[in-house]
Amino acid sequence: MQRNIQLSVRRRFFYTAGVAAVALATALSACLLVPGSALAAACGDDVEGQRVACACGDVLVSSATLRGDDPVVADAPCSHNGLTIRAPRGAQTVTLDLGGNSLLGSGLGTGVNVVSGGVGGALVRGGPGSEIVGFTYGLRASGRSGLAGVEDLGLRANRRDGLVARGDGVDLVNVSSSSNGRHGLDLGGNNGVLRGVSSTGNLKSGARLAGTGNSVQADLADNGELSRLRASGNDLSGVENDDSNGEVAR
C-alpha cells in the first residue's frame, strides 16, 4: 500500500515538473515575439500592422527605419546586444535602415546580429554619420539567407571584429571599419562586391576574404598585420595598401 502511494506521489511530481517546464518554455518563446516583453521583443515598422519601436536586445521581424527617439538609439549604450534580425518564414527580405542614427554598445554582445534576413537576405543601411560602435562584434551574419548587403555604415571600436559575414553575394558599399580589436572585415563567401570600402587602424587584419568571384575596391591602411585577401578567382585590382601593412597577401 505504502509503495503504491510513493509511486503515485512520484508520478504526480514528474507530471507537475513536466507541465511547469513546458509552460516556462512557452513563456520564453513568447518573450521573443511579444512587444513589451521583459526579454527580447519583436519590433519593426510592421508588426501585425503596427510600428513597434526597437529597444536594445529586440528582434527585428519586419523592415524598419530607426528614429532618434527609438529606445535602441535614445537609451544608448546597450548593455548587451543591439538588434537581432530574424525574418519571418517566407519573407523576401528585411531592411534595417539606421536613418543616420548610431547603435552604441558597452563592450558586450553584437550590434546587429543577422540570424535570418529572408529569402534574399537582409540589407543594413546606415546614412551620414551612422555607426555601430562599442560592441564585441559590430555586425555578424551567417547562412545562405543571412546578409545581402551593407551600405553607408561605419563600424568602429568594437572589441573584436567590425563585421563578420558568411554567405555568398554579400555587397558592401561605402562601408568603413576602424579601430576594432581584431579584424575590420572578416568575409567568407563567393561573388560579393566591396566598393568604396575602408578598413583602417584595426589591431589585426583590415580585411580577411575567403571565396571566389569577389570584386574588391578597398583602402586597407595602418592595420596591425597583413590583410588576407585570396587573389585566386577574385578581382583585387582596386585594393589600396600602404607600408604599414607590409604587402597585401594575395
Image (cartoon, rainbow, N blue to C red):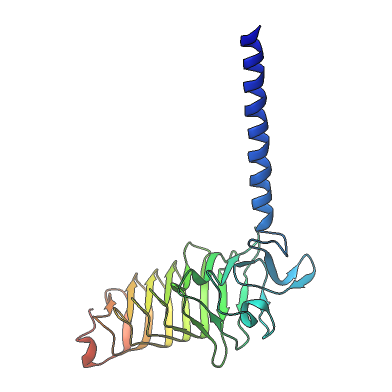
- The foreground one among 94 and 182 is 182
- Residue beneath the point at 69% across and 54% down: 30
Question: Please, is residue 142 above or below residue 103 in the view?
Answer: above
Q: Is residue 192 left or right of residue 249?
A: right
- Write down the quadrant of residue 212 in the picture: bottom left
Q: Is residue 224 left or right of residue 145?
A: left
Q: Is residue 128 left or right of residue 209?
A: right
Q: Where residue 8 sits in the image (x, y, percent)?
A: 66, 17
Q: Quadrant of the C terminus?
A: bottom left
- Write down the quadrant of residue 17 in the picture: top right
- Residue beneath the point at 66% across and 6% down: 1
Q: Residue furthest right?
A: 49
- Residue beneath the point at 62% across and 81% down: 73
- The foreground one among 161 and 171 is 161
- The foreground one among 26 and 214 is 26
- Residue beneath the point at 46% across and 81% down: 172
Q: Where residue 91 sits in the image (x, y, percent)?
A: 65, 64
Q: Where residue 94 sits in the image (x, y, percent)?
A: 62, 71
Mark count:
0
Question: Please, is residue 143 above or below residue 181 in the view?
Answer: above
Q: Where residue 77 sits in the image (x, y, percent)?
A: 55, 79
- Write down the quadrant of residue 56 in the picture: bottom right
Q: Residue furthest top?
A: 1
